[in-house]
């Protein structure tokens, strides 16, 4: 499976999940017939610009902040929300620049109304602050491999501006580049196992990271559920985890007759989804494991953990040198944490905590499935060795995880069918637990 195939299978990230599908058109697309190389040389040619912004404005800002001269742009790439540029400066310094694909000063020309622009501007400013604070936090924990953040800024909105070529309306980050490249996945199994072992250790280290209380308080509700939906204080307890999951259910499934899904679909919650909501809320207190440190610690999730967001050196001794793109990071109780590792397929766990693979490609042979199953087994074996409490929390919270990940996986398809089936499972599970309690 090629890198292009891997990129095309990415889903829309949670940072834009609350927007209408029309707003996705506000993000610049990848230039056609551009392979990501030769951009620096192109700046001196008469060719039509590849991007809606002037790349020379990016170089000028980098040079002004770092005090050097850019001499090359070896490669450019595209993520969900940002373009990434590898820049070489005179004197051998190398940096990575991430520049937002959305320019807030272009939105009025794309038909956005002032309220939408204000909301997006506030969201982007907060997202930039969040990601910058993650890098600041992790700079004191070098065992969680990240690049050094050299500079960052949020977008600046200029009302009534003409369609811009500058970059002031785009968020921007500058990082020191570490050795290696993204999407390194060698041909030989031995090198792949070496990479997976390092990834498992990195994932265990992230899980065991103790977060400052003020960081948790400020950022836990950055992703749903919102603070207003969670009663009580934020604490690493069973009571809070129950409130957290129930708030997620209540926000995802409004009361009967309420709007659900994409705004333009005008879909209303029907009786089946409404009944499912009640069944799920009733079940949650019964499926949470007993009070303890491991299931209810509040942990930092990367949100998109995989080789496409890692810098890795080439064989024969590949090394993971950086985990990047923390834009979809979030904080959850430990039993809702997701250890999944993305390669060309996803290395995950089933409902019983057994390694499995998913997101396989069309035409994948039995031999290839077996090969990737062995990678999943290796990854989770090492993860269990370095963070056995992680595996214990996952297994203890299997029913809560089923609800949590079903809610996160919904993409707006028929809510009556989707949540109706989830509610029927919740009813069956409630009866099973009630039967066990009654001794029947």
Image (cartoon, grey):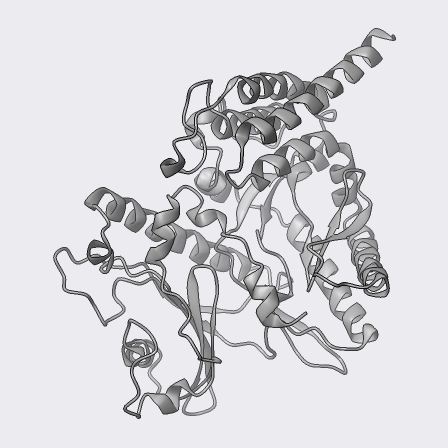
Q: Residue furthest front?
A: 363
Q: Quadrant of residue 133?
A: bottom left
Residue 161 point in image, percent of width and height: 14, 61
Q: Quadrant of residue 364?
A: bottom right
Residue 435 point in image, percent of width and height: 82, 11
Q: Quadrant of residue 314?
A: bottom right
Specify whether 176 is left or right of 400: left
Q: What residue appears at the point 69 percent right and 34 percent down from the top-left corner?
A: 402
Specify whether 234 is left or right of 426: left
Residue 233 point in image, percent of width and height: 50, 26
Residue 43 shows in the view: yes
Front one among 429 and 258:
258
Q: Is residue 104 above or below residue 148?
A: above
Q: Residue furthest left?
A: 160
Residue 70 shows in the view: no
Front one among 325 and 355:
355
Q: What residue appears at the point 49 percent right and 69 percent down from the top-left corner?
A: 148
Q: Is residue 254 above or below residue 123?
A: above
Which corner quadrant holds the N terminus?
bottom right
Which corner quadrant holds the C terminus?
top right
Front one among 311 and 417:
417
Q: What residue appears at the point 80 percent right and 77 percent down from the top-left corner?
A: 188
Residue 404 point in image, percent of width and height: 62, 34
Q: Is residue 367 above or below residue 21?
A: below
Front one among 132 and 194:
194
State how many labels appear: 0
């Amino acid at each position: 499976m090629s890198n292009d195939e891997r990129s095309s299978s990415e889903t829309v990230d949670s940072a834009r999940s609350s927007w209408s599908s029309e707003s996705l058109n506000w993000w610049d697309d990848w230039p056609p017939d551009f392979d990501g190389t030769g951009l620096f040389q192109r700046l001196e040619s008469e060719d039509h610009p590849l991007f809606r912004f002037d790349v020379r404005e990016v170089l000028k800002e980098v040079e002004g902040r770092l005090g050097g001269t850019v001499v090359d742009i070896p490669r450019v790439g595209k993520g969900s929300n940002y373009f990434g540029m590898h820049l070489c400066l005179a004197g051998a310094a190398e940096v990575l620049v991430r520049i937002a694909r959305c320019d807030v000063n272009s939105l009025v020309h794309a038909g956005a109304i002032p309220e939408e622009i204000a909301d997006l501007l506030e969201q982007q400013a907060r997202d930039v602050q969040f990601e910058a604070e993650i890098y600041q936090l992790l700079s004191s924990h070098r065992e969680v491999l990240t690049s050094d953040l050299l500079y960052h800024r949020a977008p600046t909105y200029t009302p009534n501006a003409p369609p811009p070529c500058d970059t002031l309306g785009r968020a921007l980050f500058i990082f020191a580049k570490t050795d290696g490249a993204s999407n390194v996945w060698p041909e030989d199994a031995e090198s792949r196992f070496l990479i997976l072992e390092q990834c498992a250790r990195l994932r265990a280290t992230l899980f065991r990271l103790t977060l400052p209380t003020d960081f948790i308080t400020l950022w836990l509700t950055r992703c749903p559920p919102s603070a207003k939906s969670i009663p009580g204080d934020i604490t690493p307890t069973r009571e809070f985890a129950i409130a957290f999951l129930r708030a997620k259910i209540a926000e995802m499934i409004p009361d009967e007759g309420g709007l659900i899904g994409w705004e333009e679909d005008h879909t209303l919650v029907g009786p089946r989804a409404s009944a499912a909501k009640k069944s799920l809320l009733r079940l949650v207190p019964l499926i949470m494991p007993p009070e303890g440190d491991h299931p209810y610690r509040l942990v930092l999730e990367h949100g998109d953990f995989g080789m496409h967001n890692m810098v890795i050196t080439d064989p024969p001794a590949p090394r993971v040198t950086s985990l990047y793109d923390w834009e979809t990071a979030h904080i959850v109780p430990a039993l809702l944490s997701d250890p999944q590792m993305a390669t060309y397929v996803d290395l995950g766990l089933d409902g019983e905590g057994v390694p499995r693979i998913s997101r396989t490609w069309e035409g994948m042979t039995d031999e290839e499935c077996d090969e990737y199953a062995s990678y999943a087994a290796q990854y989770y074996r090492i993860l269990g060795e370095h963070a056995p409490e992680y595996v214990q929390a996952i297994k203890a919270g299997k029913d809560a995880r089923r609800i949590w990940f079903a809610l996160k996986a919904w993409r707006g398809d028929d809510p009556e069918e989707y949540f109706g089936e989830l509610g029927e499972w919740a009813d069956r599970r409630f009866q099973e637990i009630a039967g066990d309690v009654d001794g029947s």
